[in-house]
Amino acid sequence: MVKVHIELSGGLELLFGNQKEHDVDVPVCEGQEALTAGQVVVWARDNMLRERPELFVKGNSVRPGILVLINDCDWELSGGIDSPIAEGDQVVFISTLHGG
């Protein structure tokens, strides 16, 4: 298990019981040495998401329009879904899509 701090904003918190911050223990997949950002996305979908998964995920990644930051750095700079997640890391999901 890896302790991860997850934050949601831009409206995503509404899909997660209207709670913006979560401290969770995410299991490392069997046969893997380290936790990845993609595994955090799938775990959050399966264990935290309360409604409308199609607004959060597409396949095993986040939908287009959702910015993911790992320790305040865009996950695209560290490998996207393959980015390693260590004990105590912060993962932030921000929806950039808004109605109007």
Image (spheres, grey):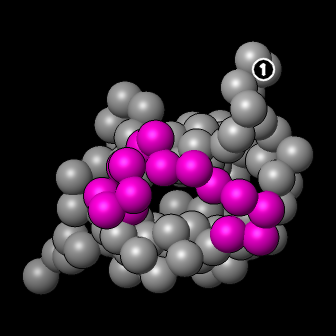
- Report the span colored magenta: 75-89
User: Which residue is located at x 22 percent, y 52 percent?
Assistant: 64
When asked about the image quadrant of residue 78, the answer is: bottom left
User: Which residue is located at x 35 percent, y 70 percent?
Assistant: 74
Which secondary structure lies at badge 1? loop
Above or below, 94 relative to 36? below
User: What residue is disc 1 on?
Assistant: 30
Residue 52 seen by the camera: no
Q: Is residue 100 left or right of residue 85?
A: left
Q: Residues within 10 Å of mark 1 (few under 14, many from 20)?
A: few
Say which of 23 and 70 sits in front.
70
Residue 98 seen by the camera: yes
Q: How many tags in the picture?
A: 1
Q: Amino acid at mark 1?
A: Glu
Residue 54 in picture, x, y percent from top left: 36, 42
Q: Is residue 77 left or right of residue 46?
A: left
Residue 7 in picture, x, y percent from top left: 59, 75
When asked about the image quadrant of residue 59, the answer is: top left
Quick check: is 58 in the magenta stretch? no
User: Which residue is located at x 68 percent, y 79 percent?
Assistant: 21
Quick check: is 87 in the magenta stretch? yes
User: Which residue is located at x 78 percent, y 47 percent?
Assistant: 26
Residue 38 in picture, x, y percent from top left: 50, 41
Say which of 100 and 97 sits in front.
97
Above or below, 85 relative to 41? below
Quadrant where the C terminus sits is bottom left
Say which of 18 and 77 sits in front.
77
Residue 48 in picture, x, y percent from top left: 69, 52
